[in-house]
Image (cartoon, helix red, strand yellow):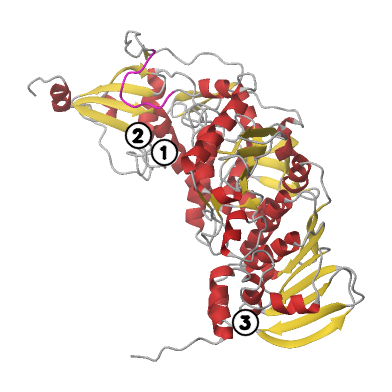
Amino acid sequence: MAKVRILPDRVANQIAAGEVIERPAAVIKELVENALDAGATRVEVEFRHGGRALMRVEDNGSGMSQDNALLALERHATSKITEAADLDRIGSYGFRGEALPSIASVSRLELQTREQGKDEGTEVLINAGKIVHVRECGRPVGTRIVVTHLFNSVPARRKFLKTDPTEAAHIIQCVRLYALASPQAAFTLIEDGRVIFKSPECATLVERVAEIFGKQTAEALIPIDVSEGADGEGRASSAAAGAMSLRGLIGRPGVGRATRHEMVIFVNQRPVNSRTLNYALIESYHESLPKGRYPLAFLFFECEPAAVDVNVHPAKREVRFRSEPAVRSFVIRSVLEKLRSLGGEAQQASAAAPPPFSGEAKGPAGAPFSPPTLHTAALPQTGGRAISLAGEKVSLPAPRLSPFGAFAPAAHRELAAGVNQAASDEALSARAQAPTSVESSTAPSAQGNGPAISFNKTSGPSAWRFIGLAHGAYALFETGAGLVLLDRRAAHERVWFERLQAQFRDAAVPSQRLLLPVALELDPIATALLLDRLKFLAEHGVELSEFGRNFFRIEAVPTWMEPADAEGFVRDFLGLVREGRLQGRNLDLMREELARLAIRKALRLPATASEEALRGLLAELFATAHPLTSPSGRPTYVELSHSELARRFSKPA
């Protein structure tokens, strides 16, 4: 058996760094936390090449003496706690004393600091855990730390870093979170010599949100301030058992995002990723947002320090509550009450969405059950335009020509147009210049790429007898073998998905220039992501130009997209990029995801359809490569055989 030995401090620090320092953003996080714990009112962060080349954090906090500066570089040396009981009343960001020695062990670290009342400061230079020099220096009160050559002493870790833009996005997100948590401090963020954002001291959270995320985001938010078991000032009192408070900003009903990146939650001023709080917030919006959309939120949850454990994750990103059910219930109740107090906006968003089909008849208690009405009427006239999709006329609202229309929240515009219906269940749209005309098409194209399907008069879909339309969503057909129930939404998605894929693949996306470009304001991360993908979007019909810091103009869109939908399309596209679903070099996969996004954002179905339109849709569906399912995997139609019907009614087959 190998001999047991104590590891050298340098090796032990490198192992500890593997837990705490995962990527450049983790270095920035630890240094910014130290600055805020030191009482800084000005924090400047600079990085180059995604943090690989250089990271600098400078503050005007209390600074350190030479003795304290050297002690801070030792493992488990901290001024935040003195005994185990202090873990139950932590009021600072850091407390373990691991950050600085961990960073110093895997990089070249230069620390300059000066405390109040001293004429000279201290400079310490460490390379891969070894002190190079300690000397006096001149500098203002506060601390300046420069980190270079990250992971040079552990090359294996350096190989696992992502691209510079990806690492930069993580750093920007990290600084944004701490800037939100501390509006009393001025933050400056510099990337490769370019100022990403410069936010002065702010009196309110909404001002800080406007500075960092843009005015459009700030205007879509409403304040919330709720306390339970709190003191007279309305804040959670540590003396009150189970005291909790929730304050901050939440999105208005109907305003959502495609990803969770703007769902920001703090626990006792600490940015965290809490499943309990995330679930509670999403659940609170089940009446106000369609399925698949996430709320906007910048929330501060406060409770007794002893009621939450922040020491369960090496990087302190996760927390554990002593009573998770109570916390979840409090958040859901608080947010729901706020949404419902807005004069019925949340209820209107909910009323626009029919309940999901479960196969069971539901209605008011005691009400007699009514079978669904079958509609065979043709499409009613609308005030907008109407084009043909698979033989079915699709109503398009008249385009909005106001140059300021783009500044209204995207989801509110959809609600006003009657689009948001059960997770956009009925949000299908088309524009006139499709790659092939389908208005008169009632049979699949002979050149289609789909499987060879026989449309004979005895068994093919062309021989199915149309019965009617149920709930405006399901077309019922009688076949020789039984019944078929066609999901209009799923069928349209499949048809348009393959049509758009073909357009994207062949670089044949018809586009139209906008008479009045749509203005788009983004946050710094989204701006960086968009700048790298302007060419890709232009190749797929969406042309944008930059006209200011974090501002863009949408100047052209595909012919199947309404100008009013362009802003939401670009935002959702960037959301997919953040999630990594539009990364890499596989253009086919990227175009597939883009097509999925396009059909979600751009297609609208009328409330009803004629038999001719439905037969045309059926023919187009069976001409596709995969007619059995929608792009998301939902079935396009369901068959009920004679034997299945007989079994349901307990009859012999």
Where 609 sits versus 8, above or below? above
Q: Residue 152 — which label? A: 3
Residue 352 visible somewhere in the drawing: no
Residue at the disc numbered 1: 494
Q: Main secondary structure of the magenta part?
A: loop
Callout 1: helix, strand or loop?
Answer: helix
Residue at the disc numbered 2: 636
Q: Left or right of 347: which side holds 51?
A: right
Q: Residue 326 — which label? A: none
Q: Are marks 2 and 1 in contact (CB under 8 Å)?
A: yes
Question: What amino acid type is highlighted by mark number 1?
Answer: Arg
| Residue 183 coordinates in the image, percent (x, y) | 77, 48
Label 3 crowd (10 A; few <14 / some 14-19 / many >=20): some
Q: Are marks 2 and 3 in contact (CB under 8 Å)?
A: no
Magenta stretch bounds: 355-364
Q: Left or right of 371: which side holds 421?
A: right
* Nearest to viewer (mark 3 / mark 1): 3
Callout 3: helix, strand or loop?
Answer: loop
The question of residue 359 being in magenta is answered with yes
Question: What amino acid type is highlighted by mark number 2?
Answer: Thr
Give the CA separation, mark 2 to mark 1.
8 Å
Q: Residue at x 55, y 26 (%)?
A: 419
Give the CA separation, mark 2 to mark 3.
54 Å
